[in-house]
Amino acid sequence: MKKRYSISSFQCCQSIENFYANVAKIIGITVTDNTVYDCRKIRVTVPVQNCIFAYYKENGFSNAAISCNWLMRGPKADLTGDDLAFEVEDGFTSESGDLCAH
């Protein structure tokens, strides 16, 4: 069984890289310059997705660029709920490799 975590809007309304770093810190992972994240190992609620999209829109990204970035590096937004929440699987972070985001 996976544990569901809450995340603040401040920690959530970030670039995908910063969002992932905030997630790692919330779950107790020490983030280093070598930490990489596996976007296949995280699920979020739609409000989290909307928050991240809003960050990119506020920073001048087009809808196409946001969508492309999300498809390549974003988490799965299939977690139920209207809150800012996420779940991670084992292997979400590692200290080497070339995964979805860094």
Image (cartoon, rainbow, N blue to C red):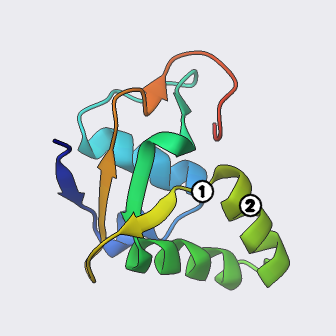
Q: Work out whether residue 58 or residue 44 is closer to the camera in this orientation and state it.
A: 44
Q: Is residue 16 left or right of residue 87?
A: right
Is residue 7 visible to us here? yes
Label 2 packing within 10 angstroms: few (<14), some (14-19), many (20+): some
Label 1 packing within 10 angstroms: few (<14), some (14-19), many (20+): many
Q: Which residue is tagged 1?
A: 74
Q: Quadrant of the N terminus?
A: top left
Answer whether labels 2 and 1 touch (C-beta < 8 Å): yes
Give the residue type at disc 2. Asn
- Which residue appears at 52% of the width and 26% of the height? 35
Q: How far across and how far down the image is residue 20, in percent?
A: 47, 47
- Which residue appears at 59% of the width and 15% of the height? 96
Q: Which residue is tagged 2?
A: 69
Give the residue type at disc 1. Gly
Mark toward the start of the polypeptide (2 vs 1) = 2
Q: How far across and how far down the image is residue 98, in percent?
A: 70, 25
